Image: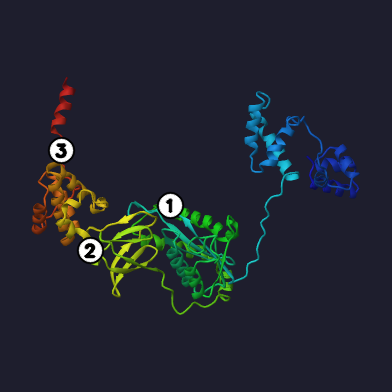
Amino acid sequence: MVTDNQVRKMKKLLSQGKTLEVAASRSGMDEKTARKYRDMEQLPSELKAGRVRDWRTRKDPFAEIWEQVLPFLELNPGLEAKTLFDYLQREHPGRFSDGQLRTFQRRVKNWRATEGPSREVYFPQRHEPGRLSQSNFTHMEDLGVTIAGVGFPHMVYHFVLTYSNWEACSVCFSESFESLNEGLQNCLWELGGVPREHQTDRLTAAVNRPDNPEQFTQRYQGLLAHYNLKGRRTNPACPHENGDVEQRHYRFKKAVDQALMLRGSRDFGTRSEYEAFLQGLTRQLNQGREERFRREQKELQPLPARRQEACSRIDVKVSSGSTIRVHRNTYSVHSRLIKERVTVRLYHDYLEVWYGQRCVEKIPRLHGRGRHCIQYRHIIDWLVRKPGAFENYRYRNDLFPSSRFRMAYDHLCNHHTQSKASKEYLLILQIAATESEAGVDDALCHLLNNGEPVNARKVMELLESNAEVKSVTDIHIDEICLSAYDQLVSMEVGA
């Protein structure tokens, strides 16, 4: 194949008075080819660019059945060529081989580009510094992060400035308003300023249902007003309108995955350690955006004098079962609050129970619906007085603080009547509430491992004696004498 440089060299030699034979030889081409390019004004590359092949090298194997294919393509634009090819193979057995799939795919692709329906157009947007931020939630479970060896299912509230792509994140566990409230405020205070507009998708925590005439919920409107933010939301089923943060979701999670690989472990000692890891990663990612970020910082609005309280307040009445219902989940409180009205301050990962201007309980928040959190310390005094209620108590499984307590209860049931087992177990649970849950757990471990009777008196004796309880992992193995093995080997050799 002749190149442009060969032709240029050949013409240069000819201009120096060389013969065509010499010029062709020195340029590395045949004399006939040299004569062809001598008489032409175009280079080889220009000839190839201007030549378009408009003929087929072989007969089109799908020409006869193409009219059968067109209705499928016109009716269902998303139908894949592979699916249609499999259909043709079933309809015409033996006519089309697997090797013709690529030919059929090229024909379908060509039809879609020349005669098919128009495709959706995405219009690049011009971003102004300090004008718009976007945020959304993204799930992180697929990264396999664990805390102290235990799986850590969680989400991240992700915040992005559309001009500089500066980003920040906050760990959360649900797409609740409280998570949105705290996440947005955390990111704004880390940013050190406020953009003029903020956009989300149609989060139920922020956007009202379609039958509600107001665009945003009152709580979200209040949050935006506190920071002088103008709210925007995407249209239904149009995630690309929140494209900056959606694209950052993918890149951020990929960066987290790579950083975890580099770290060599996906396990963290505490949640705080994991959050510090994420904060360090976002600072690293933002280092490459400093120039545009500095330009954007100049256009940001100032922060308000203080943060808005990142919680919701709910007034509820304590039931006769010493429980309260918050967002369709059940929590226990101390029995002294029965029939009283309390105020619940609901945060994104915990709730506080207030009575008489005083916080009386702080409880981890349950996520989802229909769940319950019953703390035995709240009700144990009355369960001891009414032991018959324990067997069929709706939330009985919550009254086993650890597997050891469950094993102790099963042991009692195997050696006593149901009534006696319940009474004895509740007395043990009362000791855990008044003395030490960890100490009772160790005492039960000692009694169960040594085959001793399990009862409240024995547990109390072990606690009062302050005797060190050996862990089940403390195993002593006697030293093995190998002389017998040596004798056996010598006997085999002698035989």
Give the residue at the far top of this rendering.
495
* Residue 411 image point, x, y percent: 16, 44
**Cα distance between the residues tagged 1 and 3:** 48 Å
Mark 1 falls on what kind of element?
helix
Can you identify the residue that label 2 sits on?
Answer: 335
Q: Earlier in the sequence, mark 1 or mark 2?
A: 1
Q: Earlier in the sequence, mark 2 or mark 3?
A: 2
Instruction: Judge depth for marks 2 and 3 and give the one in front.
Output: 2
Taking the image as drawn, is residue 476 in sight? no
Mark 2 falls on what kind of element?
helix
Q: Earlier in the sequence, mark 1 or mark 3?
A: 1
* Residue 461 image point, x, y percent: 8, 55
Q: Is residue 111 above or below residue 136?
A: above
| Label placed on residue 480 | 3
Can you identify the residue that label 1 sits on?
Answer: 141
| Quarter residue 312 falls in | bottom left
Q: Is residue 377 left or right of residue 89?
A: left
Give the residue at the far bottom of this rendering.
305
Q: Is residue 60 left or right of residue 419?
A: right
